[in-house]
Image (cartoon, rainbow, N blue to C red):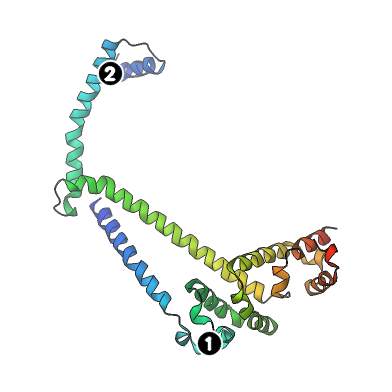
Amino acid sequence: MNEAQFAHRVRQQLEAGAPLDARVLAQLRAAREQALARHRPAAADEVALAGGALGRLGGVRPVLLRVVLPAAILGIAFAATYIWQKQQRAAEIEELDAQLLSSDLPIDAYLDQGFAAWLKRRASQ
Amino acid sequence: MAQAARLAIALVAALLLAAPAGAARDQDRRWAQLSTEHQAILAPLRAEWDRLEPAQRIKWIGVAKRYPKFTPIGQQRVQTRMKKWVKLTPEQRKQARENYRRISKVPPERRGDLKQLWAEYQALPPRAKP
């Protein structure tokens, strides 16, 4: 059995909900933490490399990249959507008002509470 | 990644700068700053123009841009109705737009002449009106 096959079987066991005693759980936790600890310095290096041009802010850089940048992008996306929707709505109202004001009926007909309903009922008769 | 960050920062800065710039532009569009063509079309609004909301001014300028495409009778209607329209409350205008949408949805071949129907409706005794 090679490593991948072994890992697959372990995963199957875990997914099946293998009952593990506290000792095994503790070993697994320790192994996981070890693996993460080994992984972390590499990840930090990457961030440092990528953030190189972002100014000499030292420890601020990872925060900038991981928090501020996504937040800024999200904020911009929201703002852009909001502005776009507002403009769409304004354009819609402009079109509607132009049609309404040049239509056959006077404004009073559109202000009347019952006329539209009366007209609809009559047309469906 | 660094480029993306710089781009994001530039965009935020642009957005922050653009907002007050937009607000400043709203202070423009005063009556005196309109083109003579738009002034002629929007003449019925002259007295209240500078008191209109910025969004309303933008909308009316938009209407004025569409105006040359209206039929002569449509142009006349817009001009005679605009003064009354701006005096309505926002709720009344919303209601009127909603009714306009509802009435427009009824197919013309099924409803017939709107002006005639409106006259007919107005002549109904109050009890018969919905």
Q: Measuring 53% from the left and 82% from the top, which residue is drawn there?
A: B48
Q: Measuring 53% from the left and 87% from the top, which residue is drawn there?
A: B39
Image quadrant assignment for residue B60: bottom right
Q: Measuring 26% from the left and 54% from the top, which residue is drawn there?
A: B5
Most extreme residue toward the front, as rendered?
B127
Q: Give the SS element for disc 2.
A: helix
Residue B45, x across and y down, in percent: 56, 83
The chain holding disc 2 is A
Viewer-side residue, B109 vs B126: B126
The reply, left or right, for residue A37 in relation to residue B113 is left
The reply, left or right, for residue B107 in relation to residue B89 is right
Q: Give the SS element for disc 1.
A: helix
Task: Report the disc number at residue A3.
Answer: 2
Q: Measuring 57% from the left and 77% from the top, which residue is drawn there?
A: B63
- The correct choice, above or below, for A43 with respect to A112 in the image is above
Image quadrant assignment for residue B70: bottom right
- The correct choice, above or below, for A34 with respect to A124 in the image is above
Circle 1 residue = B39
Q: Which three-letter amino acid code belongs to the residue tagged 2?
A: Glu
